Image: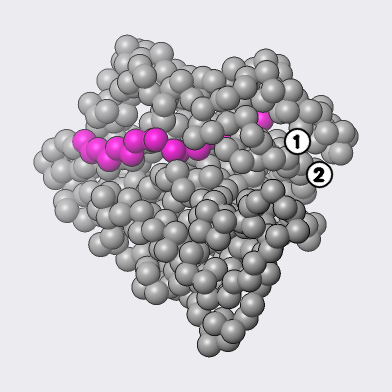
Amino acid sequence: MIKAGLDVGNSKISCVIADYKNTENINILSIVSVPNNNIKKNIILNFENLYEQIKSLVNEAEKQSQTKLNSINLNLSLLNSNSHYYDSAIELKNERISELHLKKIINQSEYFSNLNEKFEIYNNITSYDIDNNQYFNAPIGNYSDNIKINFYKINIQKKYSDNISSVIKKLRLNIDNYIPSPLSSSLSSLTKDEKELGTICIDLGHSTSSISVFENNKFVYGDAIGVGSNNITLDIARGLSTTISSAERLKTLYGSLVSSPSDDHEIIEIPIISGDKNTFKQITRSSLNAIIRPRIEETLEMIWQKIKDNNLRNKKLNNVVLTGGGAMMDNIEKYVETIFASGVRVSNPLDQLDLENKFKKPNFCDIIGSIVYDQDLFKIDFLVNQSQNSKKRGISSFFTWLDQYI
C-alpha cells in the first residue's frame, strides 16, 4: 500500500511517500524537503504562506512518486508537551487473570480521561506488575493476588495540533496518525536490540532537540527542548561578529567538540559585520570551538535534566543514539559519551530501508520514521476494538462497550 508522512518542523517541512508492505519491506518512492520560516517554537507566523508551502511540497512529492495522496501520517513536535505516568490496580485473590480484569483496570484508570486544552498524542501501557513482579506483555492466564498496570501518556497543546491539522485538512488530506516527532526519529534509527535493552535517542535539530527513550521494546519517554543547532550558529555569529551564513559555514567545516594541539595554530579567515564586504579578520580554530562546546554542553545537560526529572536516570540506559543535523558535528560521539557515560553512535535511517545516498543522513530520520510507524505496534491488543475515535467520545461510550463483558 502507499503510505505517506509529513513533518512540519520549525526549520524545515518534509514529505515522504513509500510503497509499504511492512516495517521490514519499505520502498521509498519520493522524499521532498524544503526550508521553513513560517513556524517558530510551534507558532504559525503566516498561515497562508505555510499552506502554500505544504501544498507545493506535497504536489512535488506526488509528482516524483507518481501517486495521489488521500491521507498522511503527521509528525508533531513535543515542545511544551507534558509527560504523565499513572497506574491502576485491582486485587484478585489468586484468580486467573483474564481480559476482563485488564479492561476493568483500564476503565478505572485515567486512560480515557482527556483535558480540553490538551491533545493526547500518545497513551499506552508500559508494564504490568503481578504480585510485585514486572511483566511487559499482557499476563493473561496467570494466577495472581493483585495486578497493577503502568501507563505513559503525552499531551501537547491542543491549539498547536489544531493549527497544523487545519492546514492539512485544507489540502483535503486525512490524517491517519499523529506521531510524536521524537518517536518517529527513534523508529527509523534504533535497532531491535537497542529498543529492547534500553536506549536514549537524541535528535539534535535546527531549532529544537528531542528525546525519546525505549526500554523493553516500549516507548517510555518523549520530550523536546527549544534549543538546536541554530543556536550554535547564532552564538558563533555574535561571538565572532560575523555573518550568520559565515557562522553556519564555520560550524559545519571547522567546528569540533574535541580539542587538538593544532587548534591553537590553525588560522581561519572570516568576514566581519561592517559596511565593507571585503573586511575580514583571523581567528584560531580553538577560539571557534570554545564557543561551540558550551552550547552543546548546555543542550545535553538540559536533556539529561529532563531524563532525571522523569525518574529515568536509574534505569539501565547504557546506549545513546544521535540523529538530526546536529549529530553530524565533528567528534560529537566522544563528547556525548563523556557526559552520559554511555555508548554512543550517530545513526542514519536504518539500512533495511534501502535509501538513496542523499537521504542516508541523520537529519532525515524524523521524516523517514513517519512511514516506519506501524499503529498496530502501539495499540493495546485486548482493546483492539476500542478505536482512538471512540476514546475521544468520552467515558460513557466505554461503559457501553464494557457492558458486553460484564
Magenta range is: 72-88
> Foreground residue, 337 or 234?
234
Asked whether, in this view, residue 94 is left or right of residue 35, the answer is: left
In contact (CB < 8 Å): disc 2 and disc 1: yes
Q: Where is residue 316 in the image (x, y as percent from the top left)?
A: 32, 66
Q: Is residue 29 shown in magenta? A: no
Q: What number is the disc on residue 2?
A: 1
Given the image, on which type of amino acid does mark 2 rest? Leu
Rendered image quadrant of residue 141: top left
Residue 149 appearing in the image = yes
Rendered image quadrant of residue 303: bottom left
Mostly what secondary structure, the magenta segment?
A: strand
Q: Position of residue 369 (x, y in %)?
A: 61, 47
Location of mark 2 (residue) = 29
Residue 194 appearing in the image = no
> Foreground residue, 285 or 124?
285
Q: Where is residue 133 in the image (x, y as percent from the top left)?
A: 21, 56
Q: Which residue is drawn at 37% across and 68% down?
A: 340
Rendered image quadrant of residue 5: top right
